[in-house]
Amino acid sequence: MSALPDDLGREPRRAPLPILLVEDNDGDADLITDLLAEATPAAPRPVMRATRLSEAVALLERHRVAAVLLDLHLPDAAGIECVSAVRAQARDTPIVVLTGMEDDALAMSCMTAGAQDYLSKQDVRPRTLVRAIDYAEARSREARVRMRAQALRLRSAELELENKRILEISRHKGRLLANMSHELRTPLNAVIGFSQLMADGASTLPAERVRNYAGHILSSGRHLLDLINDILDLARLEAVGLELHPDRTNVAEVAREVVDVVTGSFADKPLAVDIEIDDQLGLVWTDTLRLRQVLYNYLSNAWKFTPEGGHLTVRAAPCGDQRFRVEVEDTGPGIAEEDLARLFTEFTQLPSTVRRQYPGTGLGLALTKRIVEAQGGRVGASSEVGRGSTFFAELPDPEAPGEASPPAGPAEAR
Ligand SMILES: Nc1ncnc2c1ncn2[C@@H]1O[C@H](COP(=O)(O)OP(=O)(O)O)[C@@H](O)[C@H]1O
Ligand SMILES: [Mg+2]
């Protein structure tokens, strides 16, 4: 690496920063100031003085300083507390503790609390004072460099992870695209093939054949439209995220509507449907259209895959803190344990359920999962082969705006 960040330790050449002397005793303060001036007579370092810890902290809040010379016996604080307070206010500023006669042990513990060095006021000389300040500055610079290097290492590890994630997404997109072209091509080939047959035999084909071919073209065309609609829906979700319009929603009403719609679409296969709504579930705050879409996807699957004479149940109930759950149970063929997890990925259709009678796109559950997760919810399913399946979605039900309990306090005067 050639260019390093500019604050890796080198101070720009400007007027030297002042040294903050935190010392309540005027005699000691004068002594230290004189010693400093004596050490570098040609370029004396500016000194700022504070007599209390609070004053020092307030100064550090407003000024950058080269170093802090810190007495440990101040009118408003003593000992390590002084070091911690200065360190908390000025994270990178070197601190040199000024100690009295019997303070050696205390001085050592100040080093652990963040001081870079300590000096005994009794035997301090101009040279040792300046050396201690320089040394403290160098140590604090080193610490800064170390921290910066550590931060860079962390960032680089983060980037590596992010890279892996992006690579995985890109692979997933590639697979999706491959599947998509296959899925789109199949019905389109049927449309082209049957139209070709009709065109070739336009004058000779018996009406029965024509009806049969047209039927294939119609169902392939419809299938293609379903596919394109679902793919566009998914793409929109990916591109702009989920646009939500939450509203006070009556889940029982939504469930009834969905049952009516699905009953109508599968009029050729009557099934018994129950709706069970928990009494505890009042109106929920959710996007009504999206909830309808989720329930529709689950219920239409259940209906599609459950043989005649079967039974479906739509349930809704509160679950945990500010969440509610909807589920659809069926007495259909059930799903093997190893297949359950992958059902919610795009274009997964189990061979046992692929039927000509009610074709599907294999995108319904993938869409459902996106819609629910984008709202902070989760989806899942449980099943037993030969007995049936239950698909569920848990969704947040936050407090609706304006429903929060009014703040306690005196009523507003009118
Ligand atoms: N209730 C269910 N019972 C059995 N299998 C199901 C059920 N719901 C979904 N599946 C399986 O999951 C697959 C994916 O469902 P979905 O994403 O809705 O696609 P589609 O309904 O278009 O086939 C279905 O093709 C089917 O194999
Ligand atoms: Mg489906």
Image (tube, rainbow, N blue to C red):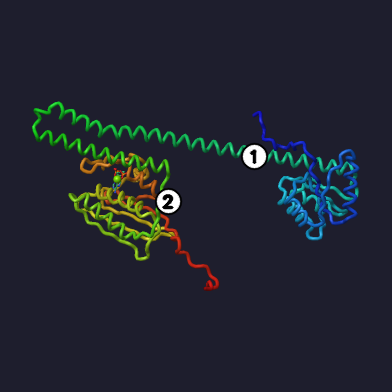
Q: CA distance from mark 2 to mark 1?
A: 36 Å
Report the front residue among 98 and 16. Answer: 16
Q: Nearer the viewer, mark 2 or mark 1?
A: 2
User: Is 64 on the left or on the right of 357, as rendered?
Assistant: right
Q: Residue at x 23, y 41 (%)?
A: 355
With 134 as the anchor, is 331 left or right in this view? Answer: left
Kindly identify the residue that appears in the image at 85 percent across and 42 percent down.
Answer: 130
Q: Quadrant of ligand 1?
A: top left
In the image as oriented, which residue stretches furthest toward the front? 414
Quarter holding the N terminus is: top right
Q: Nearer the N terminus, badge 2 or badge 1?
A: 1
Q: Report the amino acid beneath label 1.
A: Gln
Q: Classify mark 2: helix, strand or loop.
A: loop
In the rendering, at what x and y percent does residue 334 appear? 29, 48
- Where residue 305 appears, as percent x and y from the top left, is 25, 47
How crowded is the residue under tag 1: few (<14 C-alpha within 10 Å), some, or many (20+)? few
Numbered tag placed on residue 272 in the rendering: none
The amino acid beneath tag 2 is Gln
Front residue of 349 and 224: 224
Kindly indicate whether the residue at mark 1 contacts the one at mark 2 (C-beta within 8 angstroms): no
Query: How many numbered marks, from 0 up?
Result: 2
Q: Which residue is mark 1?
A: 150
- Which numbered disc covers residue 375? 2
- Image check: 145 left or right of 307? right
Mark 2 vs ligand 1: CB under 8 Å? no
The location of residue 289, given as percent across then percent down, is: 34, 52
